[in-house]
């Protein structure tokens, strides 16, 4: 069974009386696709972004049994006025619930909240749960503020209380430290690392051990930094026992690696060697399959690179679908049976 835990949606339309700052969709002549217009953005959105039948067809074609579908990241516009941000979030959440309803065992929609107003975002989580959405997507920074800052702790506390999952998608900060050409490459790695590290250093990870949170693209460069952080914490190389005489910043709390192993990470990292490293450092029970579909084309078949590792069967089952169910708060044993077409395709 294959669960693609990192895919995206776009609503087909937006209210005619929506605020001027809302996005809108324009028809594309001779096509069922639409053009997303959102501020300066012009993005040709394929029909699969918003039509459930097209999504199921695409899953069947690539051997995917279930998709976790989150809002296309540019919708996470925290620079909007808080009231408009909440209105946009509710529209997107309604659409996510509607899209999921067409094939609930195959399309699992996530919502969004106006993180520019932490109190409003926290209050909106109850509505997310009531709508049957298992969680929300947030950006890796909120107008330049790290998500591990204390002002966001009530939001994550409420998400943990409600049993909602969090998907953190890497997004650029308002102050660019790299050229625009690095937006989709190095910025993703830097911002993902900052987000995960802030959750560890700010105390959220330690305070909320039952929070189910996943980071896009394996939290960028985090995994390369963790052994160094572990050395500063306890003076150990290769996770040997503590040697506090060598430690630069001794700490009696959980080690950085222990905290990092409380998170989930999608394995959309483009190289089997990187996935192997993540398996060895973080564990096969921490990784999810992801593709960024349809913003990016899936491998053919889906998970081709991860499958090439030839992991032991139990580890492969964790990576390919069981971890995704755990992250979503679902019992893998009773998670449901996938569509026969997808099972057949994924076996090829």
Image: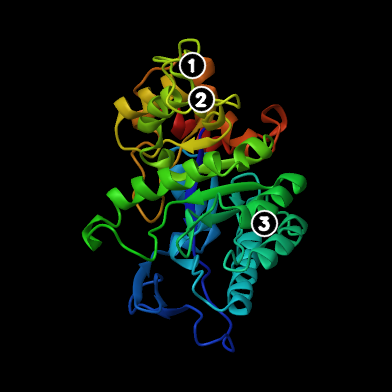
Dot 3: element: helix
Residue under the point 70% across and 26% down: 333
Tell me which corner region of the image, top left, top right, bottom left or bottom right, holds residue 14: bottom right
Name the one closer to the observer, 76 or 297.
Answer: 76
Q: Nearer the viewer, mark 3 or mark 1?
A: 1
Residue, disc 2? 250
Residue under the point 67% across and 39% down: 207
- Give x and y (percent) for residue 154: 70, 54
Tell me which corner region of the image, top left, top right, bottom left or bottom right, holds residue 335: top right
Does any portion of residue 66 appear in the rendered image?
Answer: no
Q: Nearer the viewer, mark 2 or mark 3?
A: 2
Does any portion of residue 231 appear in the rendered image?
Answer: yes
Q: Earlier in the sequence, mark 3 or mark 1?
A: 3
Left or right: residue 122 compared with residue 146: right
Residues under numbered marks 2 and 1 in contact, where contact means CB atoms less than 8 Å apart: yes
Crowd class of label 2 (few under 14; some 14 to 19; many from 20; radius 10 Å): some
Q: Earlier in the sequence, mark 2 or mark 3?
A: 3
- Give x and y (percent) for residue 174: 39, 66
Which quadrant holds the N terminus? top right
Residues under numbered marks 3 and 1 in contact, where contact means CB atoms less than 8 Å apart: no
Image vertical order of residue 270 relative to residue 180, above or below: above
Residue, disc 1? 244
Which quadrant holds the C terminus? top left
Dot 1: element: loop
Q: Which mark is residue 101?
A: 3
């Amino acid at each position: 069974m294959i669960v693609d835990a990192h895919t995206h949606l776009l609503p087909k339309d937006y209210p005619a009386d929506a605020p001027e700052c809302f996005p809108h969709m324009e028809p594309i002549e001779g096509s069922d696709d639409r053009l997303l217009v959102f501020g300066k953005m012009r993005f040709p959105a394929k029909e699969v972004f918003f039509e459930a039948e097209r999504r199921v067809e695409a899953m069947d074609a690539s051997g995917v049994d279930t998709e976790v579908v989150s809002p296309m990241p540019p919708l996470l516009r925290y620079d909007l006025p808080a009231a408009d941000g909440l209105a946009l979030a509710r529209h997107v959440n309604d659409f996510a619930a509607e899209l999921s309803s067409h094939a609930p065992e195959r399309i699992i929609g996530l919502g969004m909240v106006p993180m520019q107003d932490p109190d409003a975002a926290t209050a909106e989580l109850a509505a997310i749960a009531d709508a049957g959405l298992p969680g929300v997507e947030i950006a890796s920074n909120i107008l330049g503020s790290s998500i591990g800052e204390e002002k966001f702790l009530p939001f994550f506390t409420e998400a943990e209380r409600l049993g909602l999952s969090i998907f953190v998608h890497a997004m650029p900060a308002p102050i660019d430290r790299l050229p625009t050409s690095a937006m989709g490459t190095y910025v993703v790695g830097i911002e993902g690392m900052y987000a995960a590290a802030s959750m560890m250093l700010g105390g959220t990870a330690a305070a909320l051990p039952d929070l189910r949170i996943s980071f896009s693209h394996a939290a960028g460069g985090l995994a390369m930094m963790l052994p160094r952080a572990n050395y500063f914490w306890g003076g150990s190389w290769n996770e040997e026992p503590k040697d506090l005489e060598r430690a630069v910043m001794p700490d009696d709390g959980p080690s950085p690696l222990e905290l990092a192993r409380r998170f989930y990470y999608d394995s959309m990292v483009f190289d089997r060697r990187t996935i192997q490293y993540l398996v060895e450092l973080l564990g096969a029970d921490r990784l999810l399959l992801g593709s960024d579909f349809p913003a990016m084309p899936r491998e053919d078949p889906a998970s081709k690179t991860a499958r090439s590792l030839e992991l032991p069967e139990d580890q492969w089952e964790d990576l390919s679908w069981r971890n995704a169910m755990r992250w979503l708060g679902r019992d893998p044993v009773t998670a449901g049976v996938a569509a026969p077409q997808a099972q057949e395709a994924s076996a090829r």
